[in-house]
Image: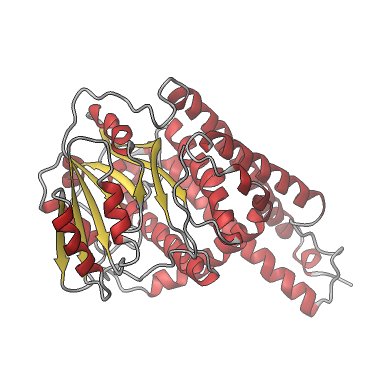
């Protein structure tokens, strides 16, 4: 019996080859880039986080903490900030129209911590508006944006601020570490932040092209943010948007692996889906709104090309799954008649490369997060979970973005903060 791949001819083979080869090629590229980063920027006496650099001066840092319905995390986050070893900082917490007890908790903390100021927005205006509001109410030279559930390492500011001694640097992003590790989804994300996000950030920094800062921990030079008009209220992922606009304006964006930030991530399928759909929509939104400007910065063509290829890869997976279902339902094909990436030698190759990539990421981040190795076993599930999630969100994000009103403000939705967060392990 004829199967759908046979009827499609060469097109099926090309698509299958692309979906198989793209992650292999990029995995090696990211791994090589991460190793280059290690030898250029991490392999020196100050590699361990409890040995921070001595700075020539300690400019004022304003830590901006937008909060929406963070009553469960606000006290822990603010208290952890007061444990920072940096001598010159203030904290501005923005209560963005919360409907829980966030306002009450933040107000009570003001009496405990003189460094803290609280700003109240009567209505939910979105993270970007909260950051813009706080940025106008401080004279600090450096602005550090974090989420309302984040815990910074005590020496985090030292590692971030040292980059701003070079005037070309407009932003520096830190190294998020996942605390929620009580479920399979949580443990897979622990590996993801090392094997994928950590490696990619290192590789991109090694060529001077960080695609995006991490919204949960990103420091900015005030003059650079002012130069580009601050944060955009209509962007779903304000971190991607501001990174691209900084690149387009000629500022350098860096990654600092020792600037640790302990974060909470979704541990339910619904919460993870909502988060990754927003990420997918936000990435597309920023690229679609900036691609015409890329001719001004030829160095960004590489980043744009890689993003476009990753989007085509995600859609390609969806096409393969769709055709596979048609083949099973209409053509009554068996498992041997249709190539499947997760079965046979292709599945073995992809799984092996993924585990090797994960092992490299764990090795690089192990000095900062001693609990990584125990999560290595769970990474065997990573390709299936991650690929299906990326594919489905990419397919759903495009029509959702097209239906979104132009200029519509990106407002808060209370995220999934996980089930049982762990305390940050000692490095």
- Please say whether residue 232 is visible from this viewpoint: no
Residue in the picture at 53% in, 68% down? 268
Q: Nearer the viewer, residue 414 or 282?
A: 414
Q: Nearer the viewer, residue 104 or 404?
A: 104
Residue in the picture at 15% in, 61% down? 119
Residue in the picture at 26% in, 53% down? 78
Q: Is residue 52 left or right of residue 137?
A: right
Q: Is residue 369 left or right of residue 219?
A: right
70 up-or-down from 43: above or below = below
Q: Residue furthest top?
A: 45
Q: Nearer the viewer, residue 392 or 364?
A: 364
Q: Position of residue 85 (x, y in %)?
A: 27, 36
Q: Position of residue 117 (x, y in %)?
A: 14, 55
240 up-or-down from 416: above or below = above
Q: Residue furthest right?
A: 1
Q: Position of residue 409 (x, y in %)?
A: 26, 69
Residue in the picture at 84% in, 72% down? 333
Quadrant of the snapshot with the N terminus: bottom right
Total numbered labels placed on residues in the image: 0
Q: Position of residue 286 (x, y in %)?
A: 36, 56
Q: Residue furthest bottom?
A: 330
């Amino acid at each position: 019996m004829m199967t759908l791949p046979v009827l499609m001819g060469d097109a099926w083979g090309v698509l299958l080859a692309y979906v198989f080869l793209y992650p292999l090629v990029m995995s090696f590229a990211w791994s090589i880039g991460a190793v280059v980063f290690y030898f250029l920027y991490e392999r020196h006496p100050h590699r361990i986080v409890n040995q921070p650099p001595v700075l020539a001066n300690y400019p004022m840092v304003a830590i901006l903490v937008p909060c929406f319905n963070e009553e469960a995390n606000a006290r822990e986050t603010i208290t952890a900030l007061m444990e920072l070893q940096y001598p010159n900082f203030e904290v501005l917490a923005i209560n963005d129209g919360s409907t829980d007890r966030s306002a009450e908790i933040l107000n009570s903390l003001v009496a405990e911590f003189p460094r803290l100021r609280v700003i109240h927005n009567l209505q939910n205006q979105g993270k970007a508006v909260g950051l813009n509001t706080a940025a106008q109410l401080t004279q600090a030279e450096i602005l550090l944006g974090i989420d309302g559930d984040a815990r910074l390492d005590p020496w985090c500011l030292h590692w971030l601020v040292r980059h701003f001694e070079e005037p070309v640097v407009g932003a520096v992003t830190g190294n998020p570490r996942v605390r929620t590790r009580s479920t399979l989804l949580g443990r897979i994300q622990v590996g993801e932040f090392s094997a994928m996000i950590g490696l990619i950030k290192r590789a991109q920094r090694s060529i001077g092209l960080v695609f995006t800062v991490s919204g949960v921990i990103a420091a900015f030079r005030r003059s650079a943010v002012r130069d580009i008009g601050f944060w955009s209220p209509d962007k779903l992922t304000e971190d991607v948007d501001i990174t691209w606009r900084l690149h387009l304006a000629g500022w350098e964006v860096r990654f600092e692996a020792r600037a640790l930030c302990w974060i909470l991530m979704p541990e339910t399928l619904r919460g993870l889906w909502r988060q990754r759909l927003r990420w997918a929509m936000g990435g597309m939104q920023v690229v679609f709104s900036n691609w015409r400007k890329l001719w001004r910065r030829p160095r960004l063509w590489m980043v744009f090309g890689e993003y476009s290829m990753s989007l085509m890869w995600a859609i390609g997976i969806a096409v393969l799954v769709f055709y596979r279902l048609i083949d099973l339902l209409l053509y009554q094909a068996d498992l041997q008649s249709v190539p499947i990436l997760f079965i046979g030698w292709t599945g073995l190759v992809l799984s092996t490369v993924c585990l090797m990539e994960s092992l490299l990421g764990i090795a690089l981040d192990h000095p900062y997060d001693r609990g990584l190795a125990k999560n290595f076993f769970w990474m065997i599930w990573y390709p299936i979970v991650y690929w299906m999630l990326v594919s489905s969100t990419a397919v759903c994000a495009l029509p959702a973005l097209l239906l979104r009103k132009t200029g519509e403000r990106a407002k808060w939705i209370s995220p999934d903060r996980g089930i049982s967060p762990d305390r940050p392990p000692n490095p």
